[in-house]
Amino acid sequence: MIVVFKPDATPDQINQILTKAEQLGLKTNVSEGVERTIVGLIGPEEVLQVTPLEVFEGVERVIPVLAPYRLVSREYQADNSIVSLSDDVKIGGEQLHVMAGPCSIESLDGMDRIARQAREGGATILRGGAFKPRTSPYDFQGMGEEGLKILKDVGEKYGMATVTEVMDARDIDLICRYADMLQIGARNMQNFTLLKEVGKAKKPVLLKRGISATIKEWLMCAEYILANGNFNVVFCERGIRTYETATRNTLDINAVGVVKQLSHLPIIVDPSHATGRWGLVAPAARAAVAAGCDGLMIEVHDNPKEAFSDGGQSLVPEKFSALMQELRPIAQAVNRKL
Ligand code: PEP
Ligand code: MN
């Protein structure tokens, strides 16, 4: 933490800060310039959350040195984390992993058909919502536990790990019995109660970026999960709301590089929700792999016209397989495997 004093700060005002720092158990390092004085404070910065130094007279600015997302940061861990969903599916290493499946789980037969084709195309993780966060309460809300059973059975049948959204902390135990990974949806990114509870769960968490969240806010949400004991977190950039209306959301491709710089945790990209249109999924997915993401989440449906949700952004299985082919040389060009 660095305290920058105003040019006209008096020695008394500077001494007040030095005394306060000493009381808080922080070491100080005073640097007197021609124009102004700067004081470096060394020690646990958390103590300053209770006593903000900005309120002292003579202080112009207080600059934190450590990231507030401690456990999530690269300072805490320099090496990339690998998040393991199963013996074969480990996110964050050389191998990229693609999560594919319908937006909502709709039926056993439908899920079976989609999973078989997604697996053939190269997906290693099966996705599908059983509890759906819909804008309208009159829209399909998901199959609930029946859907979870379908996800588990079909995932096992095709040797795929599974991921599904948890919207309510009361459902965590139930979902943990059926799925390999818990998805926190964009609308719940800052549901801190839910974050604390998945932090206590024993399954990896896919943390989607909030609709209007900054990267810092997103990292802080991951910090909630790690601080509660669960270090198996994967970020998912799924587009943010901007003034642009041509697409459902705006894919923030910068987020891949920024998160990689700031954190040791893996990051995947969801080009389906980021674009909202199936015809734009492929270019966004190509860009994401080139940018260095650790995987993708893509909505796939074999009859998008009849899909219960997000049909317009779902790829038919043939298009999904074609996209996977296109992505392989791109992955190779950035020293990854797919
Ligand atoms: C989803 O994955 O189907 C979903 C609802 O995603 P998001 O939370 O990113 O909108
Ligand atoms: Mn969806």
Image: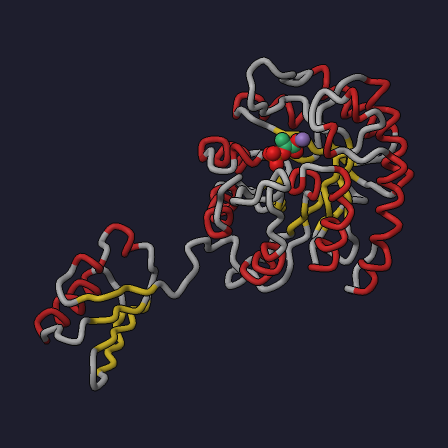
Query: x%, y% of residue 313?
Result: 73, 34
Is residue 43 found left or right of 233 in the rendered image?
left
The x and y percentages for residue 6 are 18, 71
Ligand 1, image quadrant it occupies = top right
Colouring method of the image:
secondary structure
The residue at the far bottom in this view is 34
Q: Position of residue 32 (x, y in %)?
A: 21, 82
Q: How many marks?
A: 0
Which residue shows up at 84% across the image and 40% down it?
320
Q: Position of residue 98 (x, y in %)?
A: 77, 44
Is 193 above or below relative to 230? above
Q: Who's the residue at 73% across and 45% down the image?
A: 296
In the image, residue 144 above or below residue 165: above
Q: Which of these two is toward me, 177 or 313?
A: 313
- Foreground of the two, 168 or 296: 296
The N terminus - image quarter: bottom left
What residue do we see at 79% from left, 60% from top? 336
Residue 205 visible to an observer of this rendering: no
Q: Residue at x 79, y 23 (%)?
A: 305
Image-based side of 160 in relation to 169, left or right: right
Q: Is residue 225 above or below residue 64?
A: above
* Quadrant in the picture for residue 87: top right
- Residue 155 in sight: yes
Quarter of the view holding residue 66: bottom left
Depth order, front residue of 272/126 = 272
